Image (spheres, grey):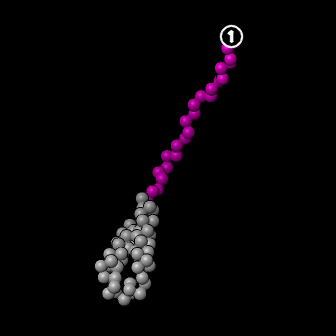
């Protein structure tokens, strides 16, 4: 049976790696903003469940809106946590 020709393989040439360091820093305000939104969102939900009927603004907004505000504030804090390096 005839043998097939072998393919000529090129020599391996490694890819040049950049020697300049990559800056992976985030702005200094990211962490305080992240903590602020997470804590304020949590406090909003806790205050609504504990004393929501006695706080005038929370009483006027309704149940779903108050919980949505708290979770939206926590979602903003979570978004900032993804930007922190």
Q: Is residue 57 left or right of residue 7?
A: left
| Residue displayed at 34% across by 85% down | 53
Q: Position of residue 69 (x, y in %)?
A: 43, 76
Q: Position of residue 17 (x, y in %)?
A: 52, 43
Q: Nearer the viewer, residue 52 or 27?
A: 52
Compared with 65, 13 (above or below) is above
Q: Position of residue 44 (x, y in %)?
A: 36, 77
| Residue displayed at 37% across by 70% down | 38
Q: How many marks?
A: 1
Compared with 73, 6 (above or below) is above
Magenta stretch bounds: 1-26
| Residue displayed at 44% across by 79% down | 65
Q: Which residue is mark 1?
A: 1
Identity of the residue furthest to the bottom in this view: 56
Q: Is residue 69 visible?
A: no
Q: Is residue 64 visible?
A: yes
Q: Position of residue 57 (x, y in %)?
A: 39, 87
Q: Nearer the viewer, residue 82 or 62?
A: 62
Bin the neighbour count of mark 1 within 10 Å (Cα to Cα): few under 14, some 14-19, many 20 and up: few
């Amino acid at each position: 049976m005839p043998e097939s020709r072998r393919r000529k393989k090129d020599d391996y040439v490694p890819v040049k790696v950049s020697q300049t360091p990559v800056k992976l820093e985030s702005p200094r305000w990211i962490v305080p903003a992240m903590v602020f939104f997470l804590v304020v969102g949590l406090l909003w939900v806790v205050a609504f469940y504990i004393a929501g009927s006695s706080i005038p603004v929370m009483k006027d907004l309704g149940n779903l809106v108050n919980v949505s505000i708290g979770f939206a504030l926590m979602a903003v804090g979570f978004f900032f946590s993804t930007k922190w390096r």
